Image (cartoon, rainbow, N blue to C red):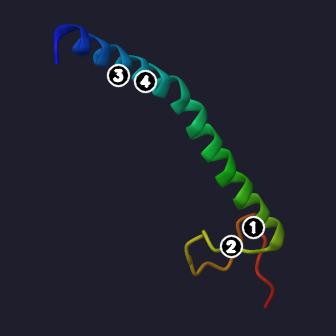
Amino acid sequence: MNGNQIQGVIGVLVTLGILVLMILPSAVGAVREWRVDRQLRQAERGEDEGAPEQGCTRSRHGAAHPA
């Protein structure tokens, strides 16, 4: 490779790096929104797969569980 080719490769890599840096925050935000939407749908259906077992006698909102 000569100097011009190396400069071209460096230019392409810098351009791709800037593109990734610009797209990354929106991609992370979209993934976070999908996760929140999934959790809300599960909560509406009454599923609670993501919560760890606590063994407490109170639910998340503070009301006692029916016996």
Foreground mark, 1 or 3, reads 3
**Residue that numbered label 1 is attached to:** 42
**Residue that numbered label 3 is attached to:** 13
Foreground mark, 4 or 1, reads 4
Foreground mark, 3 or 2, reads 3
From the top left corner, tell me how far across and down residue 31 is, in percent. 61, 46
Which tag, 1 or 2, sits closer to the chain's start? 1
Q: Are marks 3 and 4 in contact (CB under 8 Å)?
A: yes
Q: Identify residue type, mark 4.
A: Leu
Disc number placed over residue 48 in the picture, else none: 2
Other residues around mark 4 within 10 Å, as few (<14) / some (14–19) / many (≥20): few
Q: Are marks 3 and 2 in contact (CB under 8 Å)?
A: no
Q: Residue furthest top?
A: 4
Q: Identify residue type, mark 2.
A: Asp
**Residue that numbered label 4 is attached to:** 16
Q: CA distance from mark 2 to mark 4?
A: 41 Å
Which tag, 1 or 3, sits closer to the chain's start? 3
Q: Identify residue type, mark 1.
A: Gln
In the foreground, 16 or 9 = 9
Foreground mark, 2 or 4, reads 4
Q: Identify residue type, mark 3.
A: Leu
Q: Are marks 1 and 3 in contact (CB under 8 Å)?
A: no
Label 2 secondary element: loop
